[in-house]
Image: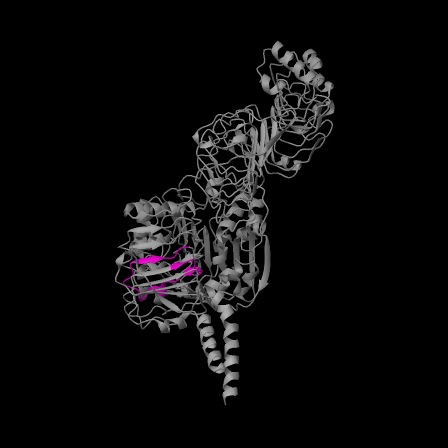
Amino acid sequence: MHLLILLWALVALIGQVKCKCSLAPILNDERSTAYVCTHGDLNDLDEISSDADWIEFTVSRFNLIPDNAFWRFRNLRRLSFYNCHVNFISSDAFAGLGSLEWLIFHGTKIHVARAVWFRPLTNLRRLILDRCGLVHVEPDLFRMLPNLQVLGLRDNDLNCLPIDELPYLRALRTVRVDGNPWLCECRRRLDQYLRSRSIVQEVECLRQISVCKKYQCMTPIGFPVLPSALTTQRLHDFDRERTLIRGNEFQTNVFNSLDRLPDKTSWIEVSGLRIDTLPRYAFFRFGNSLRTLELIDCGITVIENGAFAGLHKLERLSLVGNRLPVVGANWFRDLVSLQQLILERNGMEQIERTALWHVGDSLRHLDVQYNLFRCIPVEELADLKKLERLDAMGNPWFCTCRANLQNFLTQRNVGFEINAGRCYANENEISNGSTDWRQQQTIVQNASLTTGRVHWTSFEDSLKQTNVSTLIGPPPPPPPPEIHVVSSPPPVYTGTCYHEKPEKDSIYVCRAITSIEELGLVPSTAREIRIILSNIKKIPANTFARFDGYLSRLEFRDCGIERIEPRAFLNLRNLEYLSLRSNQLESISSEMVYGLHNLRHLDLSHNNIHRITNDVFDHLPYLTNLDVSDNAMNCIGIEYIARRLHYLSFLDVSNNPWSCLCGSKLAEFLDSRNMKYDKGSLLLKEDCYASAGSPEVTTSPPVPVTTGATLRNETVEGTCTIDEDTAERRYRCTDGNLLLLESITSEATAIEFNEGHLPRLSPGFLAKFANLRELVIRNSGLTTVEDGAFNNLKKLENLTIQDNPLEMIGSSWFVLPNLDRLDLRGNSIKHIEPGSFRYLNRLTYLNLEGNDLRCIFTSDLNEMSNVYIVEFSGNPLKWRCRVELEQFLEARKIRFIKIENSCEGKKLVRNLLLQNKTDGSFDCPSECSVASTGQNYFVLFILSSLIILVH
């Protein structure tokens, strides 16, 4: 009897361990047989009837979905995988599912959508691949789905799609593609195509706040690529130019050595290394930054489809000295930005139809010199809408074809260089009359290629070599109809100082420089110099002596200057405007301004200045404008200023902690000169910093509140204190509610609201705080900010919303023209609406750390022209989003903290795209798969023991 009870208990335990599939109710009264399998695997399919027409796997794990995995479910119409882990999908995994109409992968990390999977699914109507970590969609996939009506690619890691293949989806009616880090140009083309076919774009909405995600993209970063031509006559010149730009090199005899290159590599040249077959996805992980790829004398005989997949930013591709008789139709599918295509000395005889079609919107220069082309039909070049030049010397042309080609290029205003010597009437004449063409190719083909060289340049090195934030001047004019001499490329600035306006040689801007010596790039005849967003701790003596007699305007803004040595501005006798705004200066003495006798305008605002000596004004007799606002000054020599600065007509002293006495004198002086100023800000009415014996903080008395119906039944909670040690009315509130915030006087200049209850900010709720310069809402349960909540806060400079359950940033929240710092760390922000920062023209610091952002789109950050620090660590950013964001910030000299993530780049591409599988680092939760294994072994052990006992 006891043995029977034990056996029943074991059966029950086995039932709990095994992951079952169960029938599920169907919505909308559909007559379907649906099964849901939770924490299961393919073995659970044995319990499902062959007549099932809907199977759904949730939170399950599949090491392998083998060929014919669903073969017996011939009536299956819907198959879904939600939050599952899939290691490998065989080519014929979905064979036999000719009736399948819906296939859904949601939250399943398949990373790449392969065309071969969908070959049997000719009847598929709906394909959903949302949140699958997709980094690539194979172009041929769309050719497999002629009846597809709904395509979902939402919230993946895609930056482009093969848009030229979309017309194969003839029945497509609806797509959802939001939440991907699209390249702006690719997204523009995608939207244009969808509109032309009247295809609806479904947009995801955040349910709790009823906000829909809108169009966002990644702003391109442009910097010059290598010189536009590589020919045998110009190899020595090219080598000399290459020496100047290459950052690293090494020797190797295996192609896999490219694994040692960093993900963010902008230029790769492989020369002399034997590569018989160039495999697919060979360069995929460099797709975020690679602009130039050179494969020279590598003996390549086969280029697999997809070898250049993912290189959506590639601008120059060189295949020189290989064995490629035919230009493949699918080689260039992903090269949507390609401008230069060099195909020299490859033994090429033919260009397959549509091979150049994929680069028709971008290609400007095509080089096919020293090949075996008898003819290139003009139809092959007709799709190259932007072609400016064709180099085709050294080919055995048919006479008729060459004449047609020359006429075509002349009519299209395309410059060309084609050998004008002998041409041939037919193939027999070429093979009988000359063997030079074949001999020329066999020299390369018979070469012994063993050890080769790899040259490469990182993205960071490319930024150092050229100022990418400003490209020089307009593009050169198009070439004449026929060009026989290649013109030199336009000059490129290699420094970080550049012309603000190229047509005016006297105005220069230096951005993000780290040494004052970099001013050496600026000619001595410059009349205006602006140095901004740089890191210069000290201005040495005689720095500007060579600008004697020319320089009239000089600015140092946001440069971190802490010290100015005596006579730093010596000999600037014609300087009229000097700005030292937003630095770290603490005092100003007469030695610092020595030599500025003719100065009219001096801007010292936004420093930490607490003292300006009286003798400073002895050296500035003609000063008319003086700005000392936003410093730490308690007093200034008013009487001395009045006696020395007879021409002074503007004096800004706002936002300093003036003492009562000095503040009164300042007001009297400003009144006597009829200068405008804010009396309330200067004198702070009855409150003064110099009030001796005043307590540090006092508790403000409760103020009667008359509010709307929403607050009628509430009472004031929490306390506020005011800090009287500063010139500002700074309130610090804790444990408060809306009524406590309402109780603060409208003259407050700073409010800190900590540990309170402030779930919603309504329109106009803060409007009475017109003088507010700092607002902090920390850990106060803020979930909703309505449009207009920050209206009338025109003076706000520092806004901190921290440690709240806030989930999104609205596009109309921050109409704050003077905001300097925006700190949004530690919230739950998942989405930033497009245009959220477009009104923050003065913002210099942005903190988005510790939120739930999966992507920070550079098109949003591009609207803030003055920002120079962005913090974003602690967000679950997608691979491409993070890399694109870092490159954007590096290119614009914006400071940030680099985040290392081992689960990407080389590991991602090698495991997912080359081997079709992942390792444990990509596991998704599977409570059943791990726990069940140990329990099953335990059950088998008990059963075996019982059997032994029975016997």
What segment is highlighted magenta in the picture?
105-130
Give yes or no for residue 847 being in the magenta stretch.
no
Q: Which quadrant would residue 592 be assigned to in this image?
A: top right
The residue closer to the viewer here, 830 or 14, is 14
In the image, residue 111 lies in the stretch drawn in magenta? yes
Q: Can the viewer see residue 403 in this picture?
A: no
Decide if residue 31 is in sight here: yes
At horizontal 27% and vertical 65% (from top left) the residue drawn is 99
Residue 583 at x, y percent in the picture? 64, 31
Q: Position of residue 184 (x, y in %)?
A: 42, 45
Quadrant of residue 889 within the rendered picture: top right
Q: How is the image coloured?
A: one colour
Against 769, residue 660 (above or below) is above
Check the image and report above or below for 379 versus 84.
above
Q: Residue furthest top?
A: 672
Q: Position of residue 136 (x, y in %)?
A: 42, 57
Above or below residue 43? Residue 950 is below
Q: Residue extending furthest front? A: 1
| Image-based side of 479 in relation to 797, left or right | left
**Residue at left offset 35%, top offset 67%:** 431
Q: Nearer the viewer, residue 873 or 361?
A: 873
Q: Nearer the viewer, residue 931 or 187?
A: 931
Residue 253 placement (x, y as % from top left)? 56, 67
